[in-house]
Image (cartoon, rainbow, N blue to C red):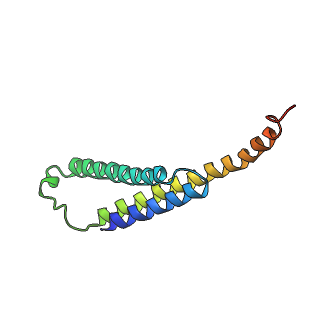
Amino acid sequence: MMSIIILAGAYRYYAGLAGEFGKTKWHFGLLAIAIYFGVQILFGFSYGFYKEMTQPGSLDAEGYSTFSFVNLIGWLISILVVYGGYKFLERKFEKERLQKPILEIEEIGKGEEL
């Protein structure tokens, strides 16, 4: 349930950022979802590998439907990576916005020469 809430929030904020800068909203919303799932999968494999290396056979008796401290850590890491990606894209779009008007101003009048 918590993952669904995080995914909905990530999609909403990335789509809002894309809309603010005139980009396709759903592309960036799906990017947020992909980043979240990618981090979750990478964290899950890393934790599973670590646990199996330190305590062989411990994953055979693991219950996967319970809430644990590891789930909380995975969510926090995913949120931080999604937020970092959001800030990276925000800075990138802001730089594009600053450069774009200069190009448009230089193009004024070039197509209307007599």
Could you say where residue 13 lies in the image, as x and y percent from the top left? 50, 62
Q: Which of 87 and 104 is in front in this view?
A: 104
Side of 56 where 19 appears, left or right: right
Residue at position x 23%, y 50% from top? 54
Between 49 and 71, the one lying in front of the other is 71
Q: Is residue 85 found left or right of 22 in the rendered image? A: left
Q: Position of residue 7 (x, y in %)?
A: 39, 61
Q: Which residue is drawn at 16% across and 62% down?
A: 63
Q: Residue furthest right?
A: 114
Residue found at the far top of this picture: 114
Q: In which quarter of the image is the N terminus?
A: bottom left
Q: Is residue 21 above or below residue 69?
A: above
Closer-to-camera residue (45/112): 112
Q: Which of 67 and 35 is in front in this view?
A: 35
The image shows a total of numbered marks equal to: 0
Q: Position of residue 94 (x, y in %)?
A: 66, 52
Identity of the residue drawn at 35% across and 59% down: 74
For the C terminus, give its image quadrant.
Answer: top right
Please give left or right for residue 100 compared with residue 109 in the image.
left
Q: Say whether residue 108 is left or right of residue 76.
A: right
**Residue 91's spot in the image, x, y percent?**
62, 52
